[in-house]
Amino acid sequence: MPWSHITESLRLPHLGSNPHKLSLRIPEDQRRAAVGVILWGDAQGARKLVLVQRGFGAPHHPGEVALPGGMVEPRDRDLPATARREVAEEIGVMEGLWELGCFPDGVAKARVRFTPVFFRWEEPEPRFHLDRELEQVLLVPLAPLLEAPWTVERLERHGLVLDVPRLELPQAPLWGATAFVIKAWLDLLAGLPDPTPAPK
């Protein structure tokens, strides 16, 4: 997927009527969080999405597939800085991340508002150093995600009915706030003109 296509997909939400909010849920916790949406590839474009699977003994969200991220700390300059710090702490990636932009905020299961920060990463040989609460890092091919058999779960949270995307991965389902963000972004990508040049 060409980087120019991805940049355009991140620009589109900011042209809408509510550029800062993805979820209709109202966060109950006033704290803020950020997650890193790392797109790994090369100069030609993005090839894979970096996800993590929480350890099965982790105190929060055991075994779930997620984006690396966490709560804002006082020393963080801004939300992208929070995402960078959490990525470094959780999977050991500290260099080579090019910030592409932020996606509208979601609301996590813990009722915290979080900002997805997209990064371009062209490390030729990805290596990770996992936090002890993580089970593994997943490098999920990007192109198949666009054609994957997503389903929808209807959930009720605090009186609000939500249609939440779900995708069965070999390791665990991709669902909840993480799936909500990823599917919303993939839908924007899918709506853009085909980046493949037409045959002559």
Image (cartoon, helix red, strand yellow):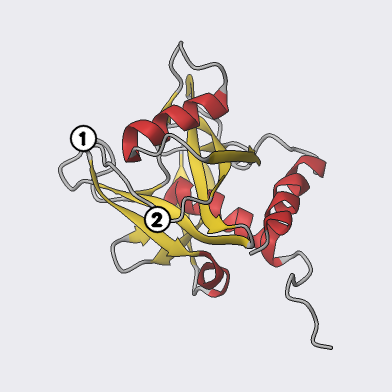
Q: Residue furthest left?
A: 57
Residue 112 seen in render: no
- Position above or below: 94 against 6: above
Please name the residue that numbered disc 1 is placed on: 59
Label 1 and label 2: CA atoms lie apart by 31 Å
Secondary structure at numbered mark 2: loop
Secondary structure at numbered mark 1: loop
Sooner in the amino-acid sequence: mark 1 or mark 2: 1
Q: Position of residue 17 (x, y in %)?
A: 80, 40
Kind of residue at badge 2: Glu
Residue drawn at x 62%, y 60% is 45
Kind of residue at badge 1: Pro
- Position above or below: 137 against 78: below
Q: Residue furthest front?
A: 124
Does residue 171 appear left or right of residue 116 in this picture?
left
Please name the residue that numbered disc 2 is placed on: 125
Q: Residue furthest top?
A: 74
Q: Position of residue 96 (x, y in %)?
A: 51, 40
Few, some or many residues within 10 Å of mark 2 (<14, 14–19, 20+): few
- Position above or below: 199 against 177: below
Quadrant in which the N terminus appears: bottom right
Q: Which mark is residue 25?
A: none
- Position above or below: 196 against 90: below
Q: Quadrant of residue 21?
A: top right
Residue drawn at x 45%, y 38% is 108
Q: Nearer the viewer, residue 123 or 167?
A: 123
Does residue 149 appear left or right of residue 64 in this picture?
right
Quadrant in which the C terminus appears: bottom right
